[in-house]
Amino acid sequence: MEHNHIRQQTNSENEITEDSEIRDWFRKLIGVWVFAIPIFILMILQRLFGINIFSEQVSVLLFLIFGFPVIFIFGFSTIRGGLRGLITFYFNMDSLIALGTIIAYITGILNLFDILLDYSGVASAIMAIFITGKYIEAKARGKATQEIRKLLELGAKKARVLKGKKEIEIPISEVSIGDIMIIKPGEKIPTDGIVVKGESAVDESMISGESKTDEKRAKSNVIGATINQDGILYVRATKIGKDTFLSHIIQLVEEAQGTKVPIQKMADKVTSIFVPIILVLSILTFFGWMLITKDISAAVGTGIAVLVIACPCSLGLAVPIALTVGSGIGAKRGILIRKGEAIQTMKEVRIIVFDKTGTITKGKPEVTDIYSDVKESYLLDIAASLEKLSEHPLARAIVDKAKLKKYRKVSEFKILRGKGVEGLIGKNKIVIGNRTLMDEKNIPTKGFEPRIDGLEGEGKTVMIVTENAEVIGLIAVADDIKEDSVIAINALSRQGYKTLMITGDNEKTAKTIAKRVGIDAVIANVLPEDKAKKVEELQKRAMVAFVGDGINDAPALKQSNVGIAMGSGTDIAIEAGDIVLAKGSLIGVVQAINLSKGTLRKIKQNLFWAFAYNVVAIPLAVAGLLHPIIAEIAMALSSISVVTNANLLRRKRI
């Protein structure tokens, strides 16, 4: 309950910060235009229509009076940030605007003494347009993070909980782990849990982005905020507050929006060099015009235009706005980009490696064949007694098949990772595992070889059961392929990716499954701890993405250039992934790659237009062809165009 409160508090703090930023710029926007509109009217009447309501000196005084709050009150944060950058030599985007507006404002004061032409009205116009642009940017960022808000709003507010024989309704924050929740048709599931009673279809589109339901029955896992469709479900709460799947998704997306893509570092470096160059160029422009025209007023105006037109606001906005939009779109479709650099790295990936169990297959193996030299019930009895002590999916399949009410006592139990298990039942030494384990233990399998070959040829995993170093039977287990694995892998092959499957299974079984789904190559008989080494070997040939879901996949996910974790997998795998797929579907891999490419394309387009704009506009300003007000309008429009281009990503089909 305390965790839940902290999580809600953190999220609300983030929302308050974001809202207050938009409100702050909106207040400044209203304030500057209240004072800037009279200035604009006076300037237009004087300079476009030659109508002088007041004398020139009175007009300048009005420009200075009305302009003071625009520049030094509503524009104070911009002026302060810009001047601090100039003093500390840590130049930023505000430096150019601050210098341009202050110089233009000072010309008004000097004009009162007949020293310079007046540009003080221009100073107010520059700041008004600049603040308008900043408000539009803040609104755009807010819109891009609305997906996260929508996720926050998805959660149920109350839960119906069984206390004794009574049903009581309590706030979601008061639900405890172990509480039995009752969810009726059409209601949201309050928090993550396991169905203990009832059957129903559940709409999980909020985590998968797909409008299809999943059938739930006893022992099925359910996710908080998904919607119960047609039956009553009794669900035991297993996670609450910040530990729930929904909270985890929100946290991952928030982290992603704060990360930097490597290309951003390049843009930041360019900006840090670009600003001082423009300051020098502005000074040179001023002196150049002084030498050529001998007109100090024209020289000042041209220098101000160079400062304003070159403000690299669009350059600073180009990457973060595209990343924010991209991660928001991903969140809506169940694709969580945990690390921004994965967007850029994905473009270079050429090899995609898949874990088998739980990634390509459903991860819920079932016993399909039993071949035994002893009574089948005895074989299952000793096999299930040992396998009950293991957490491996194959072990669970054998335990589920046996359905024992009482298990035999096992001593000296040992898990032989990637090979099998062993232990003592009474005085009998039981070893269960694959052929590799039998070879290591020098247990002959000669009479069983044809049967093992036949079962493996059907894509089944064969567990060899031995007692006192003699084979007494075989248990074949098969794990069904996910319905969309074939579609996803074929789509990746069409895009030119080389696909590989890595598994601890024997080569024959692995190749059969690979052939069924269309995977190019197989790396079989790999121990869990060796997966990362195999990825490292592949990286010598090309950039590698690894797709996995288990605890033993975490090292390989970390080792790969881009780790893609299935959200249906373990928390450890999810933490190790660069991209997390909320739904355990391989279609998500295709969508994640397409989204990464689309986001990177927008980033590059934004950077191109930001640079191209400056390359074209600066020479025009130096040549005196841009009035400072026109320069500021052009600068604001460049930022708006970058925001608009980033939002076009929403139209992309992934």
Image (cartoon, helix red, strand yellow):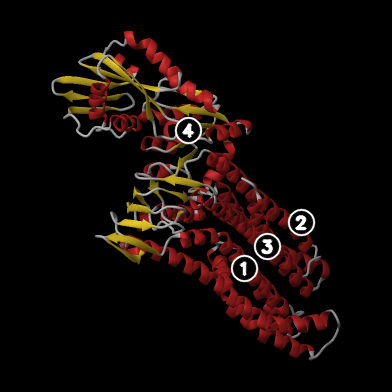
Work out how far the residue at label 1 is from the one at label 3, CA to CA, in angstroms. Answer: 9 Å
Check contact, mark 3 vs mark 4: CB within 8 A: no
Q: Can you identify the residue that label 2 sits on?
A: 616
Work out how far the residue at label 2 is from the one at label 3, CA to CA, in angstroms. Answer: 17 Å
The tag earlier along the polypeptide, 1 or 3, is 1
Image-quadrant location for residue 576? top left
Q: Amino acid at mark 4?
A: Ile
Apparent side of residue 5 relative to residue 291 in the rendered image (left or right): left
Tag count in the figure? 4
Q: Amino acid at mark 3?
A: Ile
- Residue lying furthest left: 427
Q: Can you identify the residue that label 4 sits on?
A: 360
Task: Measuring from the top left, give residue 398's x and y in whole percent.
Answer: 31, 29
Q: Looking at the rendered structure, which numbered label has been put on residue 134?
A: 1
Task: Measuring from the top left, give residue 600's x and y in whole percent.
Answer: 61, 47
Look at discs 3 and 4 and give the one toward the viewer. 4
Q: Amino acid at mark 1?
A: Lys
Look at discs 2 and 3 and give the one toward the viewer. 3
Q: Of helix, strand and loop, which one carries label 4?
A: helix
Q: Can you identify the residue that label 3 sits on?
A: 640
Apparent side of residue 115 relative to residue 314 in the rendered image (left or right): right
Work out how far the residue at label 3 is from the one at label 4, CA to CA, in angstroms. Answer: 44 Å
Residue 6 shows in the view: no
Neighbour tally class for label 2: few under 14, some 14-19, many 20 plus, Cα within 10 Å: few
- Residue lying furthest top: 446
Task: Measuring from the top left, give residue 68's x and y in whole percent.
Answer: 63, 83
Task: Measuring from the top left, give residue 25's x and y in whole percent.
Answer: 58, 73
Neighbour tally class for label 4: few under 14, some 14-19, many 20 plus, Cα within 10 Å: many
Neighbour tally class for label 3: few under 14, some 14-19, many 20 plus, Cα within 10 Å: many
